[in-house]
Amino acid sequence: MRSDALASLATEEFHDPSEAICIRTGRNLRRLRTRRGYSLDRLAKVSGVSRAMLGQIETGKSSPTLNVLAKIAAALEVSCGSLIIEEDEPTTVLLTRAASKTLSSSDGRFETRALFPYDGDRTVEFYELRIAPHHAERAEAHRHGTVENLVVAEGTVEVVVDKQPYILGEGDALVFEADVPHTYRNMTGGPAVVYLVSTYQEAIHI
C-alpha cells in the first residue's frame, strides 16, 4: 500500500476524492452497524437520523454533514473518525490539503478538516475548523467525558458552552467539557479559522 494513505483512498477505485470518502464512509457505517447488531430502523431510532438518510449514506449516495456524522457516531459509541477510517494506515502519513478529508455543513458555511489519520482506537482527534462570516454552528453534546481544547488562529469567535458565552480573539484558547450542547460563532465579516483538539475519556472500542 502507498505511504500516502489519503492519496490511495482517492485513487483506489474513484477519480473524485470526495466520492471515495463517501463510499468509504458507507462501508464503515454498514460494518459498525452490523457489528453492533443494529438494523437500519434501530439505528435511526437511537441516532435520530432517518432510515432513508442512513440508507443513502451506506450505499454511498449521500455524504453526511458533520452533525449527522456526530449523531451516528454517538449512537454507535465510536468516534467520528471510525466512520471514515482507512484500512491498514501506515504509521507515517502525509496529510496534504488536496487529499484531506473535509466535512461541511450548513450549506458549506462551516467546514472541519481532520489533521490526523483516522484510527478506531484513537482517544485524541485534531481538526481545523473554518467558519463563514457571521455564521453560528451548533454542536450537539458529545459522549460523556469528551473535552475540547481550541485556539483561534484567525478572526474573532464566540464559543457558547451550555449557554455560557466566551469571546476569543486570535491566539486565545479555550478548554471545556464538550458533553453539553455548544456553539461556534464567527463574529467578524471575514472567515474564521479555529484549531480544535478533542480528547475522549476512554479508549473507544468498536
Image (cartoon, rainbow, N blue to C red):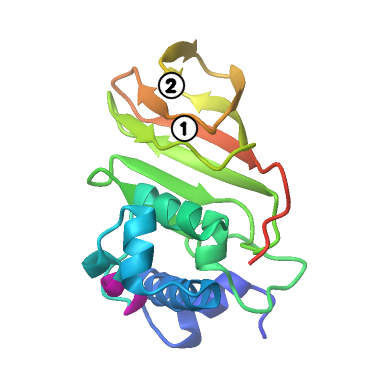
From the image, which quarter does the N terminus lie in? Answer: bottom right
Rendered view: 139 above or below 153: below
Which SS class for mark 2? loop
Rendered view: 50 above or below 187: below
Given residues 176 and 144, the one toward you in this image is: 144
Q: Is residue 49 visible?
A: yes
Place of residue 143 in the rendered image (x, y in percent of width and height, measured from the top left):
55, 43
Q: Are marks 2 and 1 in contact (CB under 8 Å)?
A: yes
Place of residue 58 in the rendered image (x, y in percent of width and height, measured from the top left):
35, 75
**Quarter of the view holding residue 130:** top left
Q: Within 10 angstroms of label 1, few (less than 14), some, or many (20 or more) residues?
A: many
Question: Which residue occupies 25% across, 43% down?
Answer: 106
Identify the mark nearer the N-term, 2 or 1.
2
Q: Is residue 56 magenta?
A: yes
Callout 1 amino acid: Val
Give the residue pinned by disc 2: 155
Numbered range of the magenta stretch: 55-59
Cα separation, mark 2 vs mark 1, equals 7 Å
Question: Which residue occupies 48% across, 82% down?
Answer: 11
Give the residue pinned by disc 1: 193
**Quarter of the view holding residue 89:** bottom right
